[in-house]
């Protein structure tokens, strides 16, 4: 896939300042509704789960409540499972997969685990089908102290009381063709760098923590998702998106060093899913089902080990 060398905003080689970021934000338009797509589903689930408002994003003229759902029968002696979706708002199946898991599979774990699910961490970006928040900040590089992203800071604060007790964290993502055609060129332009074209893998893969790789756990997630959709092969260099494939469909990142959502707890079992929604071999329903299968497999593995 060919990609533009330079982004239309800014001067090549010079990082964006306030004017360029304002110009970028002015181009972003609402293309779908957080209230209709997400909040309405949470309302349906309110009969079965406790709903927590863990923050509010004030991006005038828009205000977004940040909501998480928690097991109603929460008991301190049970393992905690954290599921996060929509950290990158444009990654649709992350949001809808998290909600679908609650609707279709969560009851199977009642009385066995405590569930804490934040289905749409970045609602402004969800509505605009974008990777960044309105300040041109990537929330999934911002899970660190004094975070520059309000979305990330709010989730860190929500999870903080249980950080050391979370056993499983599944962070639901997608890798899309627009990563290469739109978002990576924009990132290079924002940072005053040259965009180097890359390759989008065709299929599902996971990103483990290089500090705590847990390869058997990652492979259990891959095996479950393979029943739903195809797994990404390595490229000619034995890599996926530039990282060596350490097992079929598995790569590793230093998640805390990079400020990724997957590093916000001390969970021994943590993975970032990457669905490929642009494949001609995958439907939106399959993408959501892949996320559901990944969450269930992660919990099953943790309970068995």
Image (spheres, rainbow, N blue to C red):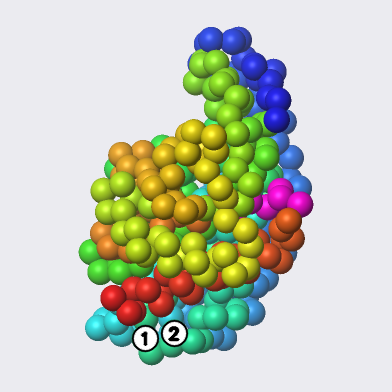
* Residue drawn at the location 55% of the way across and 16% of the way down: 194
Residue 6 picture quarter:
top right
Give the answer, above or below, for where 100 lies relative to 62: below
Viewer-proximal residue among 249 and 148: 249
Residues in magenta, as a range: 274-280
Direction from residue 215 to residue 87 in the image, left or right: right
Give the answer, above or below, for where 243 lies relative to 71: above
Direction from residue 214 to residue 60 in the image, left or right: right
* Residue drawn at the location 51% of the way across and 38% of the way down: 241
Residue 70 picture quarter:
bottom left
What's the mark number on residue 109?
Answer: 2
Secondary structure under tag 2 reads: helix
Main SS of residues in magenta = loop
Question: Where is the C terminus found, in terms of image quarters?
Answer: bottom left
Q: Is residue 194 visible?
A: yes
Cα–Cα gap, marks 1 and 2 = 5 Å
Residue 110 position in % (x across, y down): 43, 87
Q: Residues within 10 Å of mark 1 (few under 14, many from 20)?
A: some
* Residue drawn at the location 34% of the way across and 79% of the way down: 303
Q: Is the C-beta separation of discs 1 and 2 under 8 Å? A: yes
What's the mark number on residue 197?
Answer: none
**Residue that mark 1 sits on:** 112
Viewer-proximal residue among 99 and 167: 167
Residue 247 position in % (x across, y down): 41, 52
Q: Is residue 153 magenta?
A: no
Direction from residue 295 to residue 282 in the image, left or right: right
Direction from residue 129 to residue 192 in the image, left or right: left
Viewer-proximal residue among 233 and 300: 233
Residue 109 position in % (x across, y down): 44, 84
Query: What is the total number of numbered labels drawn onto the structure image?
Result: 2
């Amino acid at each position: 896939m060919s990609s533009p060398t330079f982004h239309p905003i800014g001067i090549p080689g010079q990082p964006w300042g306030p004017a360029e970021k304002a110009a970028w934000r002015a181009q972003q338009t609402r293309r779908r509704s957080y209230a209709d797509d997400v909040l309405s589903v949470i309302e349906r689930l309110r009969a079965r789960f406790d709903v927590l408002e863990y923050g509010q994003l004030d991006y005038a003229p828009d205000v977004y409540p940040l909501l998480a759902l928690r097991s109603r029968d929460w008991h301190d002696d049970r393992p905690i499972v954290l599921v996060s979706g929509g950290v990158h708002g444009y990654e649709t199946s992350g949001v809808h997969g998290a909600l679908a898991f609650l609707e279709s599979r969560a009851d199977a774990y009642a009385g066995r685990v405590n569930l804490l699910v934040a289905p749409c961490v970045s609602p402004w970006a969800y509505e605009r089908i974008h990777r960044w928040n309105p300040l041109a900040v990537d929330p999934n590089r911002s899970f660190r102290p004094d975070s520059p992203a309000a979305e990330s800071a709010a989730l860190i604060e929500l999870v903080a009381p249980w950080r050391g007790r979370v056993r499983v964290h599944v962070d639901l993502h997608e890798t899309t063709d627009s990563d290469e055609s739109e978002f990576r060129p924009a990132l290079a332009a924002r940072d005053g760098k040259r965009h180097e074209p890359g390759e989008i893998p065709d299929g599902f893969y996971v990103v483990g923590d290089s500090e705590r790789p847990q390869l058997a756990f990652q492979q259990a997630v891959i095996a479950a998702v393979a029943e739903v959709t195809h797994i990404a092969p390595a490229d000619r260099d034995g890599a996926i998106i530039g990282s060596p494939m350490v097992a079929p469909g598995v790569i590793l990142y230093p998640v805390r060093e990079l400020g990724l959502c997957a590093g916000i707890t001390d969970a021994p079992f943590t993975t970032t899913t990457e669905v490929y929604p642009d494949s001609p071999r995958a439907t939106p329903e399959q993408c959501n089902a892949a996320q559901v299968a990944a969450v269930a497999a992660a919990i099953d593995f943790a309970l068995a080990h």
